[in-house]
Amino acid sequence: MKKTDILEKYLPRMENVLLILHDLQNNSRMNYLSEKDLSLVAHHLNTTLSSIYGVASYYSMFSLTPRGAHIIRICRSPVCHCAGVDDVFNELARILKLDVGATTPDRLFTLETTECLGQCDLAPAMTIDHVVYGKLTAASIATIIAQYRKKSASQGD
């Protein structure tokens, strides 16, 4: 979907800023908001670039730097911590050879943490894109990542 088509979906009101930013980021091949995106939103909403930048930089769901095709978010809540998320996180970092905030060289995965996914009954939990995975173990992490890699290879990504 073209950026202009996304903007035209929304009335030029500041109350639509989060919806617009989400739509632009979700339609970005590299899962982020570029400076051009922010400028387009500012123009559409008749506000300043710094105002839009302030919104985009405040919320952790937005990224201002390019990311991988799949965004992995590991829950760091106290419940997930008690359920062993550190072991799961360490296994994920080992498999992907990544630190938090980094992207794999093939641009397939970006690893992030979040304070809470609201999935305490599934602790330890993570999301990949918008899919929730819970009751994670080191073995299940390896299986999940292998599935995404296999799917990506079959799609030619």
Image: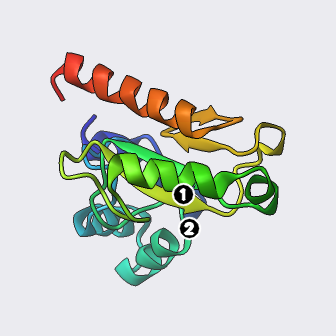
List x then y, in percent, for residue 93. 43, 55
Which residue lies most toward the left here? Answer: 156
Mark drawn on residue 106: none
Mark 1 → mark 2, Cα distance in angstroms:
9 Å
Q: Do the residues labelled 1 and 2 touch (CB within 8 Å)?
A: yes
Q: Which of marks 1 and 2 is nearer the N terminus?
A: 1
Q: In this view, does 139 lie above or below 100?
A: above
* Element under disc 1: helix
Picture residue at 37% right of the left edge, 28% below the top: 146
Picture residue at 24% right of the left edge, 39% below the top: 2
Under mark 2, the amino acid is Tyr
Q: How crowded is mark 2: few (under 14 residues within 10 Å), some or many (20 or more)?
A: few
Picture residue at 43% right of the left edge, 47% below the top: 71
Mark drawn on residue 18: 1
Picture residue at 46% right of the left edge, 61% below the top: 62
Q: In this view, does 127 lie to the left or right of 71?
A: right
Quadrant for the C terminus, please.
top left
Quadrant for the N terminus, please.
top left
List x then y, in percent, for residue 30. 26, 49
List x then y, in percent, for residue 6. 36, 42
Q: Is residue 96 above or below residue 44?
A: above
Q: Can residue 129 be seen in this view?
A: yes
* Element under disc 2: loop
| Residue marked by disc 2 | 59
Under mark 1, the amino acid is Leu
Closest to the observer, 72 or 21: 72
Closest to the observer, 105 or 20: 105
